């Protein structure tokens, strides 16, 4: 989502004459767009600011002032601390205030810095942002929903991004059409809790009324030229029946679903306030697989949540074995200030977290490698997104989000073509273009 947000900040700044530069040394303004989800990400901000201070000073000495801004969730959560620890920062702005950037830049220039905007304004950001204008390429992101009402015990998102808010269907469809006109063939709908999206239908009654996320996907599938749809990140509790049916009925919806489970222990899921059990998750996976038999799953896991015992961790390994993931992310629990888990008793020792992470990573890597290996010999439709590393090589994506490399002409970029997979590596596939099938 920060990649998408950075693009929208570029859109809002373009009318003021700003354009992206290759390095901070050439920039009249630098915006650090930051993430607060885990401590490591948040720490990076201060080390990066130390480096930018040197750049800003060097430019200042050469008579070129630089505006330094910190955006994103670290800005939201630690705005005052940033200004105190790094007083050379001119602007601190939270994720709900990007539409006010031009005014902040003017204020910072007048006052010589000191601008903090971290409230949740009454006006909706998206109503005040210009239309997305910067082309993203063959694959594009589109934010449809922000914030979250789930309040998982460990998570800062409800505090930094705020409560759940959905963009209207008409705005989403219009943006999808614009992205396709700019060359997008695959759109990934984004939201912290994307399948909680709900909105007003475009048009009047009898079409009007509340739309579900499944209905939105069906409408987007009708946008001409849009070949592929994906969405991330979903909560298991919000996989409504009509969304599962969309996986059965909508061919543009790719058979790959990121569905975080976080833990395989009911005790820990309850402590996490996840509002689902292991059995709920397994049943959901079963229903989705019935709807779309080739659906591949990805997930997020946290190891070492307060109270997690060896038996709880063993239950997570068991769930992973039962589901079989094509890909997954796992993280060591990171205490986030202000969240309920941060003050919980029975914090897990760091070496125990490290050991569990390595064990889980090994199992997930094994599953990913096996999934890729099973692709060998298959003919997969691949969307080509750009040139590969070697001359004459193309880089694309399988329906299951695997990177695929083939030799082929640059003219294939933006097209979907059948590829015979010759090699299934741990992190990517290699194959050959089936040119006779394309001609046929
Ligand atoms: N510690 C570790 N991982 C976390 N995540 C969210 N909060 C924390 C935390 N405090 C992980 C979850 C989530 C993903 C985006 O980040 O697994 O799904
Ligand atoms: Fe955070 Fe996701 Fe839980 Fe919302 S559902 S609180 S974003 S982990």
Image (cartoon, rainbow, N blue to C red):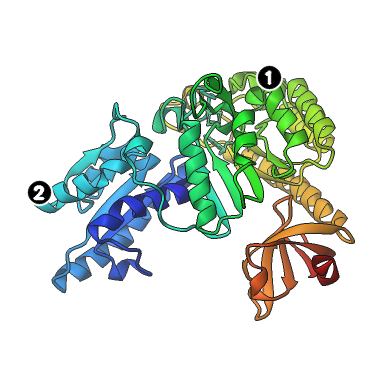
Residue 243 in the image: x percent, y percent?
68, 29
Q: Is residue 183 above or below residue 303?
A: below
Q: Is residue 398 above or below residue 21?
A: above
Q: Is residue 238 above or below residue 146?
A: above
Q: Residues within 10 Å of mark 2 (few under 14, many from 20)?
A: few
- Between residue 21 and residue 45, name the one nearer to us: 21
Disc on the earlier residue, 1 or 2? 2
* Distance (Cα) linking label 1 and label 2: 53 Å
Q: Are marks 1 and 2 in contact (CB under 8 Å)?
A: no
Residue 111: mark in rendering:
2
Question: In the drawing, does residue 196 fall left or right of residue 382?
Answer: left
State the image quarter where residue 295 is shown. Answer: top right
Residue 241 in the image: x percent, y percent?
71, 22
Q: Residue at x 47, y 58 (%)?
A: 135
- Please identify the quadrant where the C terminus is shown: bottom right
Q: Is residue 400 visible?
A: yes
Q: Residue at x 67, y 62 (%)?
A: 415
State the image quarter where residue 216 is shown. Answer: top right
Residue 231 in the image: x percent, y percent?
61, 40
Q: Residues within 10 Å of mark 1 (few under 14, many from 20)?
A: some
Q: Element under label 1?
A: helix
Question: In the drawing, does residue 350 fall left or right of residue 227?
Answer: left
Residue 267: mark in rendering:
1
Which tag is nearer the camera, tag 1 or tag 2? 2
Question: In the drawing, does residue 13 fall left or right of residue 142?
Answer: left
């Amino acid at each position: 989502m920060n990649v998408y947000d950075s693009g929208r900040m570029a859109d809002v700044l373009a009318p003021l004459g700003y354009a992206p530069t290759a390095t901070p040394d050439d920039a009249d303004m630098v915006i650090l767009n930051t993430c607060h989800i885990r401590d490591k990400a948040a720490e990076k901000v201060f080390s990066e600011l130390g480096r930018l201070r040197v750049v800003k000073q060097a430019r200042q000495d050469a008579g070129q002032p630089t505006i330094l801004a910190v955006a994103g969730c670290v800005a939201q959560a630690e705005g005052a601390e940033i200004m105190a620890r790094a007083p050379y920062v001119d602007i601190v702005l939270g994720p709900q205030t990007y539409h006010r950037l031009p005014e902040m830049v003017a204020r910072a220039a007048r006052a010589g810095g000191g601008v903090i905007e971290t409230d949740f304004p009454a006006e909706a950001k998206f109503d005040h942002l210009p239309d997305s204008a910067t082309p993203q390429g063959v694959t594009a992101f589109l934010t449809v929903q922000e914030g979250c009402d789930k309040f998982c015990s460990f998570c800062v998102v409800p505090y930094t991004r705020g409560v759940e808010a959905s963009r209207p269907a008409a705005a989403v469809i219009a943006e999808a059409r614009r992205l396709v006109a700019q060359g997008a063939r695959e759109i990934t709908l984004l939201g912290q809790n994307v399948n909680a999206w709900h909105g007003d239908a475009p048009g009047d009654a009898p079409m009007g009324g509340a739309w579900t996320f499944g209905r939105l996907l069906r409408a987007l599938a009708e946008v001409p030229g849009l070949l592929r749809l994906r969405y991330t990140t979903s909560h298991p509790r919000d996989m409504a029946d009509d969304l599962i049916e969309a996986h059965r009925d909508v061919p543009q919806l790719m058979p790959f679903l990121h569905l975080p489970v976080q833990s395989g222990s009911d005790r820990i899921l309850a402590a996490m306030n996840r509002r689902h059990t292991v059995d709920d998750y397994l049943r959901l996976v079963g229903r989705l697989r019935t709807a779309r038999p080739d659906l591949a799953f990805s997930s997020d896991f946290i190891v070492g949540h307060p109270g997690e015992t060896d038996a709880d961790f063993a239950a997570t390994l068991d769930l992973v074995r039962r589901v079989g993931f094509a890909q997954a992310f796992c993280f060591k629990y990171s205490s986030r200030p202000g969240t309920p888990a941060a003050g919980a008793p029975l914090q897990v020792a760091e070496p125990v977290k490290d050991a569990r992470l390595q064990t889980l990573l090994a199992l997930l890597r094994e599953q990913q490698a096996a999934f890729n290996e099973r692709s060998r010999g298959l003919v997969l439709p691949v969307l080509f997104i750009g040139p590969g590393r070697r001359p004459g090589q193309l880089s694309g994506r399988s329906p299951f989000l695997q990177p695929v490399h083939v030799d082929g002409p640059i003219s294939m970029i933006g097209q979907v073509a059948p590829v015979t997979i010759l090699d299934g590596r741990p992190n990517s596939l290699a194959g050959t273009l089936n040119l006779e099938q394309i001609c046929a």
